[in-house]
Amino acid sequence: MTKGWRKESARHALARKGIRTGIKVELEHAKTIKKIRDKNLSLKEAAAEIAKDHLREDSAYYDKLKIVEGEMPDKIGAKEYFEVTKPLGGTTTADHLPIETIVTVPSTRYDKKISKQELNKRILETQKFLSQIFGGYTSIEALGGYIPKKGGLWEEPIVKIISFAKAKDYKKSKKRLAKWLKRKKKEWKQETIAYEQEGDLFLV
């Protein structure tokens, strides 16, 4: 199996998963779709009917959509922005950082444990890098397990470095992040490095 084929297969799997999820969500428009078909509405009339569905569900639907896509925060005032997002029920204001990224720092070199000094160096490197591109981090110690190529179950202490970013900052830095992860995989002598984004796990 070639590397290019694996990448294409992974993309297709993600696309299929997205389509299945999308079908479940968009079936909420079943009655509207039937109305569009039965009345033979024009494209503009059909779009208007679907927009009405979204606005009946949430009057701020399209404002929130802009926020998710990273378009709105820089174009509206703080008061209007927090009226739309209403963090903590609208009782407070804060920056909205919707993109969560997590880098798992391993405590091994292949299947050999490294020294505490070397682990701390890896942790510091990761904390510093994520702070540079996203502005900050949170560290959580945990126990991780996996099955290496030679078989069996291997467990090791790990540290998860968590960072949150605005959509525009993530888009700006994602290529740099990908290169950094690939470089650390080689430097740390890992089969893979675990990277999480918005709850999805990727093995780099």
Image (cartoon, rainbow, N blue to C red):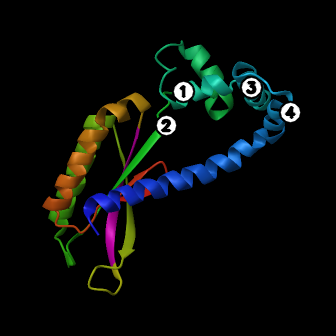
- 63 sits left or right of 142 in the view: right
For this orientation, the residue located farthest to the front is 40
Nearest the eye: 109 or 87:
109
Q: Residue at x 16, y 67 (%)?
A: 189
Kind of residue sitting beneath label 2: Pro
* Residue beneath disc 2: 98
- Is 160 magenta? The answer is yes
Say which element carries label 4.
Answer: helix
Mark 1 or 4, closer to the camera: 4
- Quarter location, residue 34: top right
Residue 155 in picture, x, y percent from top left? 34, 78
Quadrant placement of the C terminus: bottom left
Kind of residue sitting beneath label 1: Ile
Kind of residue sitting beneath label 3: Ala
* Residue beneath disc 1: 67
Quadrant placement of the N terminus: bottom left
The circle drawn on residue 46 is: 3
Disc 4 to disc 2, C-alpha distance: 40 Å
Mark 3 or 2, closer to the camera: 3
Say which element carries label 1.
Answer: helix
Marked residue nearer the N-terminal end (4 or 2) = 4
* Residue beneath disc 4: 38
User: What range of the chain is rendered magenta?
Assistant: 155-164
Residue 200 in picture, x, y percent from top left? 47, 55
Q: Residue at x 34, y 57 (%)?
A: 7
- Circle 2/circle 1 CB separation < 8 Å: yes
Note whether 59 is above or below 146 in the view shown: above
